[in-house]
C-alpha cells in the first residue's frame, strides 16, 4: 500500500467551513461578502445532504418576533421564552442574540427567495410553536428547511464560492494552541488533504446516527463535536436533546401537532392500548394529547412527557412491534377530518403508500435535534484561536429545551456571525501552518486503515446505536449511564487494535471513532446531571433541583481522557 503521508495534498484558504448546510452556507456568504477566500467542504452532496434540507414534519418553522400575528410580541419576549424554555441553563447572551437578530436574517431569506406563507393581505403568517408566548413561527409548510437551503445554495453559486463535495474532515490541525485548518479525506477516492486556513468554522450539524431511532439524514455521526473535543475545545449541554414521536422506517417524519389533537390510539405490538396506565392521577388522555400537540419534543415540563415515557417503556420492555416501534392509530377518526384538518401529513403519508384513514403508523421516540454542542461565545468563537462553530454543531445558545423555530433561526444568526468574525480574524492573521501536525493525523488514519482485527465496524455501530437509544434517550438512570460510559470507553480502546477495516470501510471507521467520542460526551454529561430538567429525565432523580443544578456541564478531552466542569450559566447584565 502506498503511504498516505507521502501523498497528502495541501490546499490553502482564508476561511475553511466544515459542513455545507444552513449554518455553513450562511457563514460562507457572509465571509465572501467581506472579501476573503472561502472554501466549504461538505461530507455529502451540497444542498442535498445534512439536516437543513432533509428534516420532515408537518410544519417546519423559522422563529422570529415580527409582531405580525400579535403586536405584543417582541424580541425581548422571544429572548425570555428561550431562557425559560431552556430552564435557565443556557448562555443568555447567546439567547438574546438569536432573539434580536432573527428578524434581520429572516428578511434576508425573503430577499433571497424563500416563499414564507402569507395571508390574503400579503402579511407573513405566524403560528404558535412549542414554548412561544406569541405566534412567531414562519414557514413554507413541511419543506421550510429545503426552501431555505435552496435559497442559500443559489446565493453561494451566484457568488461562485468554492464548494468541495464528498469531503469528510478527519481532524483539526493544532499548531501552538491555534487551529490552522483541518485534514480531510475524499470519501470516494480516500485521498487526504491538509486544508490550511486562518479561520475554521465547524457547521457539521448534529449526531442523530448515534441513536437507533432518529430522524436525521445519513452521515450525521457527530463529526464536528468529536473533532472539536479531540482538539481541546469544550462541549456544553450535551445531555439535552430533542426526542419526539416519529416514523423512522421506511421514511422519516415527525408526528406532532394536529395528529395528536385528533386523539390517536396508542397500541403496542400485542394489540393493547397502554397510555392510561402511565398517566399520573388527574391527567386525562385528552389533556396529555392536547399538551403533546404543542410540545412535540419530549420534556418533563408538563404531562406530555408521559406519552414519550409510555412509548419508550413499551418498546424496551418487549411489547413493541417487529420494527421496535408502537402503533399510532387514527382509523377511528372521521376520514373527512383527516383529509382536511390533517391535510399536510395525510398527503405526505398517502404519497408514500400509507393511508392513515385505514392503517396505523409505526412510531418510536426518535432523536430530532441536539440542544448542546461546541461551546461558543457571542462571536461564535469556540475557545481555541482560529476555531468557530455555528448551527447545531454549536452549544450554549439552547438549554434543556428550546422554542420551536429556534433551530433555523439559530443557524442563520450564528452562521452569519461565524462568517463575519472568522473573516475578521483571517484578515488580521498571518498564514501559519503545521505540516508536521497534519502528517500525524494522516499517520493515524493510515494506521486505522491497516487494522484487520475481529470486530466488524457495522456491528459495533449497531451496538452503539442500540445502547445510546436504550440508555441515553428518554428514560435515564445513573447505574445504566455509568455502564454505558464504561462500554463506550471499552470500544474506544478496541478501535486501535481489534477493528477490522477493509479498504472500502475507512470512512465508516472514521465515523465510528466520532460516534464513540460524541457518545461519551453525551453519556458523561447525562451521568453527571443528577436531576430531571426539561428533556433530561433521570428516573432516579425525578425532580428539578434548581438549588444544585441550575448549572451548565462542560465536557473537555485531554490525551484521550474526558474531564467535566460544572459552572453557572452566563446571565445577561
Image: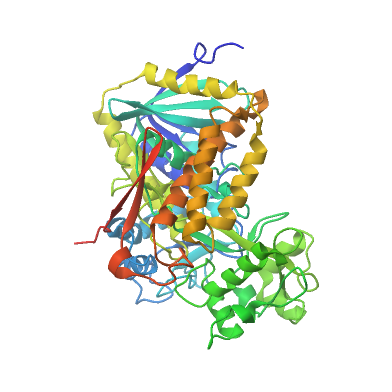
Residue 54 in view = no
Residue 340 in view = yes
Q: Position of residue 357 (x, y in %)?
A: 78, 74
In-image side of 347 versus 558 (left or right): right
Query: Which residue sits at x=38%, y=67%?
Result: 66
In-front residue for pair 459/255: 459
Instruction: Looking at this view, name the residue that lies furthest to the bottom.
Output: 282
In-front residue for pair 527/185: 527
Q: Position of residue 385 (x, y in %)?
A: 28, 34
Identify the colour scheme used.
rainbow
Query: Which residue sits at x=56%, y=20%?
Result: 191
Instruction: Looking at this view, name the residue that lies furthest to the left.
Output: 573
Q: How many marks?
A: 0
Question: For the C terminus, which image quadrant?
Answer: bottom left
Q: Position of residue 127 (x, y in %)?
A: 49, 72
Q: Position of residue 319 (x, y in %)?
A: 71, 67
In-front residue for pair 92/499: 499
Q: Is residue 173 above or below residue 313?
A: above
Question: For the N terminus, which image quadrant?
Answer: top right
Quarter assignment of residue 26 = top left
Quarter assignment of residue 60 = bottom right
Query: Which residue sits at x=65%, y=45%?
Result: 462
Amino acid at each position: 500500500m502506498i503511504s498516505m503521508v507521502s501523498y497528502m495534498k495541501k490546499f490553502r484558504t482564508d476561511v475553511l467551513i466544515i459542513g455545507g448546510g444552513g449554518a455553513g452556507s450562511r457563514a460562507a456568504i457572509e465571509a465572501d461578502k467581506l472579501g476573503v477566500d472561502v472554501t466549504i467542504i461538505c461530507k455529502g452532496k451540497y444542498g442535498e445532504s445534512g439536516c437543513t434540507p432533509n428534516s420532515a414534519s408537518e410544519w417546519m418553522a423559522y422563529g422570529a418576533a415580527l409582531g405580525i400575528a400579535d403586536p405584543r410580541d417582541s424580541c425581548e419576549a422571544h429572548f425570555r421564552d428561550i431562557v425559560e424554555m431552556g430552564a435557565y441553563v443556557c448562555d443568555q447572551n447567546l439567547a438574546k442574540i438569536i432573539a434580536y437578530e432573527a428578524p434581520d436574517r429572516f428578511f434576508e431569506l425573503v430577499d433571497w427567495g424563500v416563499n414564507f406563507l402569507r395571508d390574503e393581505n400579503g402579511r407573513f403568517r405566524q403560528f404558535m410553536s412549542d414554548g412561544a408566548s406569541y405566534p412567531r413561527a414562519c414557514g413554507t409548510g413541511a419543506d421550510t428547511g429545503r426552501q431555505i437551503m435552496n435559497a442559500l445554495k443559489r446565493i453561494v453559486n451566484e457568488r461562485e464560492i468554492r464548494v468541495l463535495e464528498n469531503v469528510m474532515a478527519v481532524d483539526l490541525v493544532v499548531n501552538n494552541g491555534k487551529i490552522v485548518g483541518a485534514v480531510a479525506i475524499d470519501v470516494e477516492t480516500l485521498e487526504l488533504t491538509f486544508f490550511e486556513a486562518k479561520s475554521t468554522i465547524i457547521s457539521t450539524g448534529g449526531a442523530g446516527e448515534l441513536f437507533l431511532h432518529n430522524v436525521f439524514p445519513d452521515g450525521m455521526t457527530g463529526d464536528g463535536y468529536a473533532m472539536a473535543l479531540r482538539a481541546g475545545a469544550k462541549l456544553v449541554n450535551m445531555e439535552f436533546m430533542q426526542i419526539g414521536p416519529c416514523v423512522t422506517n421506511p421514511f422519516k417524519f415527525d408526528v406532532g401537532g394536529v395528529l395528536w389533537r385528533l386523539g390517536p390510539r396508542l397500541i403496542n405490538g400485542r394489540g393493547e392500548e397502554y397510555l392510561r396506565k402511565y398517566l399520573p392521577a388527574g391527567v386525562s388522555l385528552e389533556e396529555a394529547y392536547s399538551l403533546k400537540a404543542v410540545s412535540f419534543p419530549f420534556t418533563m415540563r408538563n404531562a406530555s412527557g408521559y406519552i414519550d415515557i409510555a412509548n419508550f417503556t413499551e418498546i424496551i420492555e418487549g411489547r413493541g412491534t417487529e420494527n421496535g416501534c408502537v402503533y399510532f392509530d387514527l382509523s377511528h377518526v372521521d376520514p373527512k377530518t383527516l383529509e382536511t384538518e390533517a391535510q399536510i401529513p395525510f398527503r405526505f403519508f398517502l404519497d408514500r403508500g400509507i393511508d392513515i384513514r385505514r392503517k396505523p403508523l409505526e412510531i418510536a421516540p426518535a432523536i430530532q435535534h441536539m440542544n448542546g454542542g461546541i461551546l461558543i461565545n457571542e462571536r461564535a468563537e469556540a475557545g481555541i484561536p482560529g476555531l468557530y462553530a455555528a448551527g447545531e454543531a454549536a452549544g450554549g445558545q439552547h438549554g434543556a429545551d428550546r422554542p420551536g423555530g429556534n433551530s433555523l433561526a439559530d443557524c442563520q444568526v450564528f452562521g452569519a456571525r461565524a462568517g463575519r468574525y472568522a473573516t475578521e480574524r483571517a484578515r488580521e492573521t498571518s498564514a501559519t501552518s503545521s505540516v508536521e501536525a497534519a502528517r500525524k493525523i494522516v499517520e493515524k488514519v493510515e494506521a486505522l486503515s491497516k487494522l484487520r482485527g475481529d470486530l466488524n465496524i457495522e456491528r459495533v455501530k449497531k451496538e452503539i446505536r442500540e445502547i445510546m437509544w436504550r440508555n441515553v434517550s428518554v428514560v435515564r438512570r445513573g447505574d445504566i449511564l455509568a455502564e454505558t460510559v464504561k462500554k463506550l470507553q471499552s470500544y474506544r480502546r478496541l478501535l486501535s487494535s481489534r477493528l477490522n477495516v477493509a479498504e472500502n470501510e475507512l470512512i465508516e471507521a472514521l465515523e465510528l471513532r466520532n460516534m464513540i467520542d460524541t457518545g461519551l460526551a453525551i453519556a458523561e454529561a447525562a451521568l453527571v446531571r443528577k436531576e430531571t430538567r426539561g428533556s433530561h429525565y433521570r428516573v432516579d432523580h425525578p425532580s428539578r433541583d434548581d438549588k444544585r443544578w441550575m448549572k451548565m456541564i462542560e465536557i473537555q478531552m485531554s490525551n484521550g481522557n474526558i474531564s467535566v466542569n460544572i459552572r453557572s450559566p452566563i446571565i445577561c447584565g
